[in-house]
Image (cartoon, rainbow, N blue to C red):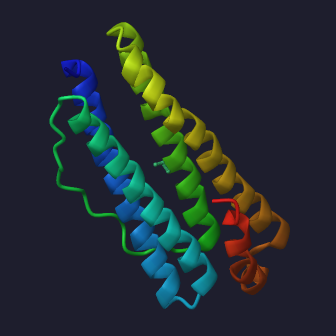
Amino acid sequence: MLNKKVEKILNEQVEKEGYSSSLYLAMASWAEVNGLAGIAGWLYAQSDEERMHMLKIIKFINERGGKAVVPAFKQPGKEFTAVRKMFEEVLKHEQYISASINEIVAVCMAEKDYTTHNWIQWFVTEQIEEEANATAILDKLNLLGDKNLYVFDRDILSLRAKD
Ligand code: FEO
């Protein structure tokens, strides 16, 4: 049976991953209507990935004898004023998610739940990549400057070729 404190924090993470999916979906939609098809494609794929993270946690909770709860997700913003600012928000959000994954690791240790501790390592590794992807995008944006968004929009999808 899944430890109750671990179950609780995993359900909180379900909400965070689901919100991440909605947030990137909102960003994708904004980029799409602003003529940035490449950026929209990257964000749509990222939104799908976040949904996959959420599902992974839901299935784990249920598989371990807990009960996953699908929560209400708060509404993300609708307007994103500038591409660079939006990706700064992506990086900040991923840093926040990394911190919450680390918190799950800490609870697993405190509760001596070594099974979940072992399982959550996938997310620990995933967060290294998530932060690195956002940082790589910001580095490119800094190199190109806001005036070269056309080039950036054309090239961004190649930045996630490894996924
Ligand atoms: Fe599921 Fe981007 O963290």
Rendered position, 42 above or below 53: below
Which residue occupies the extreme front position in the image? Answer: 63
Residue drawn at (54%, 78%) of the image = 40
In this picture, residue 10 sits left or right of residue 154: left
**Toward which corner of the image does residue 86 lie, by quadrant?**
bottom right
Q: How many marks?
A: 0
Rendered position, 2 above or below 153: above
Instruction: Estimate the x, y position of residue 157 in percent, counting from the top left.
Output: 67, 74
In this picture, residue 59 sits left or right of residue 119: left
Observer-nearest of 50 and 144: 50
Instruction: Estimate the x, y position of residue 155 in percent, counting from the top left.
Output: 75, 77
Instruction: Estimate the x, y position of residue 56 in percent, counting from the top left.
Output: 36, 46
In this picture, residue 73 sits left or right of residue 142: left
Residue drawn at (52%, 29%) of the image = 121
Q: Where is the N terminus found, in terms of image quarters?
A: top left
Which residue occupies the extreme right position in the image? Answer: 143
Rendered position, 150 above or below 134: below
Residue drawn at (28%, 43%) of the image = 59
Residue drawn at (67%, 64%) of the image = 160
**Toward which corner of the image does residue 133 lie, by quadrant?**
bottom right
Instruction: Estimate the x, y position of residue 26 in percent, counting from the top left.
Output: 40, 72
Observer-nearest of 11 and 85: 11
Q: Where is the C terminus found, in terms of image quarters?
A: bottom right
